[in-house]
Amino acid sequence: MNQLEIGIWEERANQAQAALDSLFWNDAIKMYNIETPCPNGECNTIFHYWWMAHAVDVLVDGLQRTREEWYAERLSALHEGLLRRNGGVWPNELYDDMEWMALAWLRAYQATGEEVYKDTALLLWEDIQTGWNEHMGGGIAWQKSQLDYKNTPANAPAAILAARLYQAFGKAENLEWALKIYRWQKEHLVDPTTGFVWDGMNRTGNGQIDKDWRYSYNQGIYIGAAVELYRITKDSSYLEDARLTFSAAAHELAEAKGGVLPDEGNGDSGLFKGILIRYTAEWVKADVAAVEAVDFLRRNAESLWEQGKSEDEALFGTDWTLSSTGVIQLSSQLSAMKLLEKMAELTKDQI
């Protein structure tokens, strides 16, 4: 790794952060617009709670990388804006949404020491635990109005959160939660042969698993849960779980010739690739044997920047092989930023 490459990815991450701030931030609501352009904030017809959690995450990435104060200031403003927009409370009806918000503010607390962020994460975690029930043999429900539908999006991030809370504060019951949730996830929603992670079960009340819902998102969060449990236990079987799932994801989802992740569409799906990227990078940091993942991240990052960037700005759509044009949604911008921030972090780590 040479100094030039390190500087290149840092500069690219900086450009994407600048574009996020100048083209998406809306100071009137102290949140990001959900797309750009968005004249007078008129695009904000929906409150994308979980998108905003990922916006917190990329701000933390920038703060940890640069230690520039404006990231901390933006986090403070966003915390205020989100709380106001959610009616003065943090919980909502979707357990997976709350997990992402808790994960993001836990990281923000660790980066800034601001106690209010810790309080937010712990408050959400208390609510998240109420989602566990014995329908379908356990697991956390997807939403409060459908307690018998269990899916990967509500369970794998919860395992990551519980494990990180244990690492941060040493409370034994959080490790017990992480292990319990992970066991349920692995037993019910992971193909034991290939490691490919299925989306959910009993969505329509018939007990069936949605094996045809094949999302990069699900692979990433299971890898992330495995990595966090490895960090705690040093049990190499968790790294093997991560390796198996990564191999399945790369083989079954990435484009065969170049290894670039597919266009999964706009809306919520615009975030999916970035989630796989974030937790693949966490696996790389934990496992020196994850060499194929390093190549995978670089291929995707080079395609994103050289082919997927808009002509005039560091803006990114849902296809990392085609220059982005027209309206850019916040979800796809954040997804790309996760990749650029992780490349900047990983290249720095290899000095």
Image: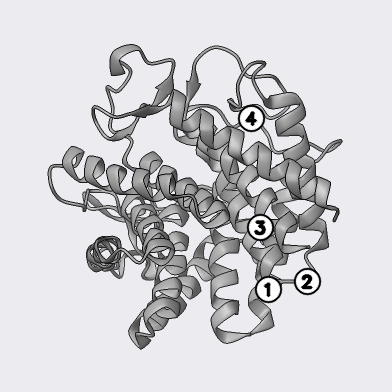
Which comes sooner in the sequence, label 4 or label 2? Answer: 4
Q: How much space separates mark 2 and mark 1, taking CA atoms? A: 10 Å
Residue drawn 77% across the image and 65% down it:
290
The type of residue carrying mark 1 is Leu
Query: Which residue is labeled 1 in the image?
Result: 239
| Number of other residues with Cα within 10 Å of mark 3, as a class: few under 14, some 14 to 19, many 20 or more | many
The type of residue carrying mark 3 is Ala
| Number of other residues with Cα within 10 Å of mark 4, as a class: few under 14, some 14 to 19, many 20 or more | some
Point out residue 140 in the picture as x, y percentages from the top left corner.
34, 63
Q: Which numbered disc, 4 or 3, marks the residue closer to the eye?
A: 3
Query: Which residue is labeled 2 in the image?
Result: 288
Query: Which residue is labeled 3 in the image?
Result: 281
The type of residue carrying mark 2 is Val
Residue drawn 58% across the image and 78% down it:
231
Query: Looking at the rendered structure, which numbered label has been put on residue 42?
Result: none
Nearest the viewer among 347 and 276 is: 347
Point out residue 208 in the picture as x, y percentages from the top left corner.
46, 52
